[in-house]
Amino acid sequence: MSTSERVPGEARPGGRTARNRDAVCRATLLELANHGYAALTVERVAERAGVHKTTVYRRWGGVDGLIVDALQFAVDDDWQPWLGGAVEDNLLELARVALRSFTDPETGPTHTAVVAAAFQSDEAINAVHDFFADRFGRSSRIITVATERGELPAGTDPLSVIRAVMAPIYFRLFISRESVSDDDIQQAVQAALAAARAGVFVMESISGE
Amino acid sequence: MSTSERVPGEARPGGRTARNRDAVCRATLLELANHGYAALTVERVAERAGVHKTTVYRRWGGVDGLIVDALQFAVDDDWQPWLGGAVEDNLLELARVALRSFTDPETGPTHTAVVAAAFQSDEAINAVHDFFADRFGRSSRIITVATERGELPAGTDPLSVIRAVMAPIYFRLFISRESVSDDDIQQAVQAALAAARAGVFVMESISGE
């Protein structure tokens, strides 16, 4: 189809497609936040987004496709970790931001619903996996910078340190269902850094090479 | 009611009650494992248990009551952590047993379904919380013994060490959805012990006293 066939005033396909994606992804995240995975339907998302449900079925396939794209949509941003302090300060800030994203009344329900969806859908598992790989990959910069500055041993695996900081917080939130205080965050950061300084996360240390 | 009123051959109330609980809790765990929380109904549990559904409603109230009691039922056992080695060996064994309980085809689906149920039910949250408090409480003996033997600093908080060992494993399994290798388990144990030896988990170290 050439551009001359376009009716004047009609939205360019790319423009409408992008707007539809924006509306559908936002609607999916809101539906997840308000009603959870179990109640998520193409019909509800389509209605909230103001898009015909056949459009949603054609482009996203169904509920699982919606979750995957909504999470991708949420990740498509410019977020970078704060690097303004010593490694301990930067990790504390990282952990506090992560905790807030789950406890904040605005963003918490959606983020929690996405973690929950992975218990019920293989597609959501992949989406959540990719989300954490992306976020932890970006967060690794904190450790790379610290290693370059000599704050941590050469060869420290950045992802292992980030995971060590975050795991106790997520564990309390979503597994053991305990409250998370700022003392808990400080302990998680101190524990990860003590292990890192002891060389536990130096890449060769585990395999014994 | 005196015993003389009992019809000969009729099960003693305590006996039937106990058998019913056993059947209903086992049925609940199996239903959770096979179909998940979202599909759990009193009718399905009653049918699988061979108990009338009005009995289930009367005694357990509904689905959430079933989950709470089934988890309590599963916890009512004689499990104790292995204490036969040095602290590192005992923690490795603890972590391997925990991982197996989630990856084993027999027990894994039920255990996973219980963690998942907490995303959908406040009663399940409380039940899961109590489950981990019980298991981690028993596991703390590993750390208490190690501290008494001088393997860890005096005043080390046992629960903090156990949580530090287990959190990265649960995090990979249920949050970031990464595979868990035995190297990962070894790293988690080494990291928790390095932090413990550095005094991070000594009870006063966080509050700065």
Image (cartoon, coloured by chain):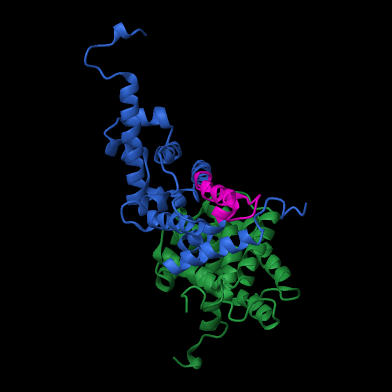
Chain colours: A green, B blue
Rendered location of residue A103, percent (x, y): 64, 55
B204 or A109, which is in the foreground?
B204
Determine the residue positioned at 48% across, 69% down: A129
Q: Quadrant location of the N terminus of chain B?
A: top left
* Magenta stretch secondary structure, dominant: helix
- Give the magenta part as a residue range: B136-163
Q: Residue furthest left?
A: B9
Residue A49 seen in this snapshot = no
B61 versus A196 height, above or below: above
Horizontal relation, residue B29 to residue A77: left or right: left
> Is B157 in the magenta?
yes
**Closer to the camera, A89 or B189?**
B189
* Residue B194 visible in the snapshot: yes
Task: From this view, report whether residue A59 is shown above or below residue A108.
Answer: below
Quadrant in the rendering for residue A43:
bottom left
In the image: residue B142, left or right of residue B39: right
Q: Nearer the viewer, residue A167 or B209?
A: B209
Q: Residue at x 34, y 25 (%)?
A: B17
Q: Residue furthest right?
A: B209
Percent x, y for residue A24?
52, 68
Residue A70 in picture, x, y percent from top left: 52, 68
Instruction: Check residue B134 for magenta coloring.
Output: no
Comparing B65 with A168, the one in front is A168
Q: Position of residue A16 (x, y in %)?
A: 54, 78
